[in-house]
């Protein structure tokens, strides 16, 4: 249940913020909106690549990859008995589906749509950090949580991995 709730919340937050960004921000025609004294800038961009504009031009491949990731996560979710893994995989799934939705429903066409990005940290546009969105954040935070859980030895079922004796 936690997995589904986190996934849906990440997806809804991504979709709603992208709708607001498209409705209120202009593509490079206006100055970025400065938030939190310049810690965050909001400026609308369209991204044909992966998170942080990596892999531009591989939109169809990225769409297929997002579908595969979603399928693996949904299949894995049946074995989840760890709150940490539920949060981690829910964030990754919600983020993957958020960006996949852009690739399917936005211009220039199905499977080739450009993802809406609008958050820039520490400077306008991508001066110090690539422009991103809530889905990108969810994927990165979910992946970081997964890495921490793997490092400390928490399994999907919530048990601790047994340490193997050194030879």
Image (tube, helix red, strand yellow):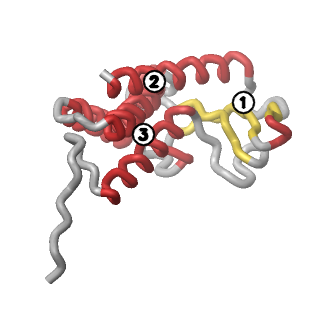
Whichever of labels 3 and 2 marks the residue nearer the N terminus, that label is: 2
Can the viewer see residue 60 in this picture? no
Residue 1, located in which quarter of the rendered image? Answer: top left
Q: Residues within 10 Å of mark 1 (few under 14, many from 20)?
A: some
- Which label was assigned to residue 11? 2
Whichever of labels 2 and 1 marks the residue nearer the N terminus, that label is: 2
Q: Is residue 148 above or below residue 164?
A: above
Residue at 18% over, 32% down: 75
The residue tagged 3 is 59
| In-front residue for pair 158/107 | 158
**Measured from the top left, where is residue 117 in percent x and y?**
60, 34
Can the viewer see residue 88 in this picture? yes
The mark closer to the camera, 3 or 2, is: 2
**Measured from the top left, where is residue 2 in percent x and y?**
34, 25
Q: Residues within 10 Å of mark 3 (few under 14, many from 20)?
A: many
Residue 116, located in which quarter of the rendered image? Answer: top right
Whichever of labels 3 and 1 marks the residue nearer the N terminus, that label is: 1
CB of mark 2 within 8 Å of CB of mark 1? Answer: no
| Alpha carbon separation for disc pair 2 and 1 | 23 Å
| In-front residue for pair 88/129 | 88
Determine the secondary structure under disc 2. Answer: helix
Residue at 34% over, 59% down: 151
């Amino acid at each position: 249940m936690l997995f589904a709730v986190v996934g849906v919340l990440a997806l809804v937050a991504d979709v709603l913020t992208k709708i607001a960004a498209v409705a209120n921000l202009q593509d490079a025609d206006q100055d970025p909106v400065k938030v939190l004294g310049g810690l965050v800038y909001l400026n609308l961009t369209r991204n044909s690549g992966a998170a942080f504009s990596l892999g531009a031009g591989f939109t169809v491949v990225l769409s297929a990859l997002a579908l595969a990731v979603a399928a693996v996560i949904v299949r894995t979710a049946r074995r989840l008995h760890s709150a940490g893994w539920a949060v981690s995989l829910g964030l990754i799934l919600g983020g993957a589906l958020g960006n996949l939705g852009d690739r399917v429903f936005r211009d220039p066409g199905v499977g080739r749509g450009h993802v809406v990005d609008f958050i820039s940290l520490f400077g306008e546009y991508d001066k110090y950090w690539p422009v991103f969105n809530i889905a990108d954040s969810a994927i990165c935070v979910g992946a970081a949580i997964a890495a921490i859980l793997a490092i400390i030895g928490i399994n999907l079922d919530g048990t601790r991995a047994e340490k193997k004796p050194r030879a």
